[in-house]
Amino acid sequence: MTDLQWATQAAERQLSESLPTRWKHVQAVGVKAESLGRLVGDDAEVLAAAGWLHDIGYAPKIADTGFHALDGARWLLRQGIHPRLASLVAHHSCASFEAEERGLKRALMAEFPLEQSPTSDALWFADMTTGPDGQDLTVDERLAEIRARYGPDDLVTRFWVKAEAPLLEAIRRTEERLRA
């Protein structure tokens, strides 16, 4: 079984019944990540697998700290998944900013190296241009949707104030690669 096959099956097992709306989002992100594989060459499969696994830490059987990126990445390591794939999940979509808000940045950075590459950029692009029901959105629409869903005082909204600039830069780099 390939990493991608394992990833799609694991995501479905963990999310489809317990979190059906999250599962819609994950399916669309996974498919979008697969379609971006041409941008990353030999990393196409790891990008696609990360797309399918990026939100697995929301699954009730996996959630531990309440920070889905860290919970999912730790679970992936326990399953024997390659540390690089776990790190992509741990750091997807500016997760270090959320980790800081939650008091978990030290743990995140100690356990999972931050990768800054076309692969991580493409994963962020796939996630942050996909709405909660799997619909395509611009990054601006996605950020507005998140802010509306969580409200102005929520931790998630607060971390995006700090994370927006680096996120937009990753999206811009991926859009440039798509045009090239």
Image: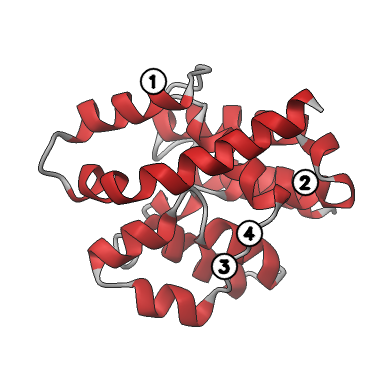
What label sits on residue 116 in the rendered view? Answer: 4
Three-letter residue code for mark 2:
Gln
Q: Residue at x 24, y 32 (%)?
A: 147
Residue at the image point whose x is 55% and y is 74% from the top: 112
Q: Residues within 10 Å of mark 4 (few under 14, many from 20)?
A: few
Q: Residue at x 53, y 42 (%)?
A: 169
Callout 3: helix, strand or loop?
loop
Drawn side of residue 38 relative to residue 27, left or right = right
**Three-letter code, disc 1:** Glu
**First along the sequence among labels 2 and 3:** 2
- Residue pointed to by mark 1: 141
In the image, residue 138 sits, relative to residue 163, either above or below, namely above
Density class for disc 1 (Cα within 10 Å; few <14, some 14-19, many ≥20) is some
Q: Position of residue 84 (x, y in %)?
A: 69, 67
Residue, disc 3: 114
Q: Nearest to the eye among marks 2 and 3: give it.
A: 3
Q: CA distance from mark 3 to mark 1?
A: 26 Å
> In the rendered structure, which disc, 3 or 1, sits on the residue that comes first in sequence?
3
The reply to whether residue 139 is visible in this rendering is yes
Which sits earlier in the primary sequence, circle 2 or circle 1? Answer: 2
Q: Position of residue 73 (x, y in %)?
A: 53, 65
Q: Nearer the viewer, mark 2 or mark 1?
A: 1
Which label was assigned to residue 5? 2
Q: Residues within 10 Å of mark 3 (few under 14, many from 20)?
A: some
Taking 103 as reference, is 33 above or below it? above
**Residue 35 versus residue 167: which sits nearer the camera?**
167
- In front: label 4 or label 2: 4
